[in-house]
Image (tube, helix red, strand yellow):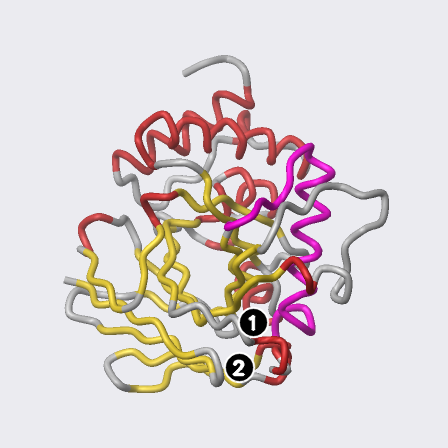
Amino acid sequence: MTTNPIDGAAEFFFKAAQAGDQGIPLPNDLMPPDADAAYQVQDRLQKMWIDAGAGAIVGWKVALTSKVMQELLGVARPCEGAIFASRVHHGDVTVAHGDFVNIGVESEIAVRIAHDLPATGTPYDQDNIRPGVAACMAAIEIVDDRAIDYKLVEAPQLIADNSFNAGCILGPDVTNWQGLDLSALPGRMLINDKVVGEGVGGDALGHPLIPLAWLANNLNQRGTMLRAGDVVLTGSIVATKWLQPGDHMVTEIEGLGQASLSVT
């Protein structure tokens, strides 16, 4: 293990995921002291996954945008994580339970970015970011927290570990979304045909475009940006649920369709 705490933390997360280590928290001497250091760890970790064949970064997730998710982790601010090309799926997907340490799912509204969103001197907000959205869709985020005790997780560790993203499943693009009130769209999660969670688009910080704008600004502050074609998961409208072999899970968002996942 390297003595550099930034590289050391990234190496810890990378090796823990590869080894399937359950519940082992980041050692205190490698814990990022703040969000800035945590994003440095995340950047290193992302490069490790890219070098290992996960594919390019083709999108981002915004975590902790709803009250239920903030209460689940005891963290009161959003954070981000990258989505790699090999982890993006479409429609009705089947995955193996053994490919994850502890597979969880979240139901979200996702957006596809129409054009690059560089820093302009004026922060993005819910209104001026609308032209940057080419399509919206129902989505499932796959998360893998390695079965860690959430009482041990604070914001820097979550950020450093790429906000637990392990992929996503996207429903069909809806390009005529502008007439929809995204904040009022009802959504629900079903597992084995039983409704296990419900919410509306506004559960994500009041409107799905608000976390999108937050992400665009945060990436700009970190010297990068959302790019044309990127997919953004705007935050779960229900609390994370954990899946077992044989489970079938569906996200339904009124007006945006659905995405589904089976676990073998």
> Which residue is found at the position 70% from the left and 54% from the top?
214
- N-terminal label among 1 and 2: 1
Q: Which mark is residue 199?
A: 2
Residue flagged by tag 1: what amino acid is it? Val
The residue that label 1 is drawn on is: 68
Residue 12 falls in image quadrant: top left
Pick the residue in front: 118 or 26: 118
Residue 133 falls in image quadrant: bottom right
Pick the residue in front: 225 or 234: 225
Residue 43 falls in image quadrant: top right
Q: Are marks 1 and 2 in contact (CB under 8 Å)?
A: yes
Q: Position of residue 199 (x, y in %)?
A: 53, 81
What crowding class fits label 1: few (fewer than 14 Cα within 10 Å), some (14-19), or many (20 or more)?
A: some
Is residue 105 found left or right of 125 in the rendered image? Answer: left
Q: Nearer the viewer, mark 1 or mark 2?
A: 2
Cα separation between marks 1 and 2:
10 Å
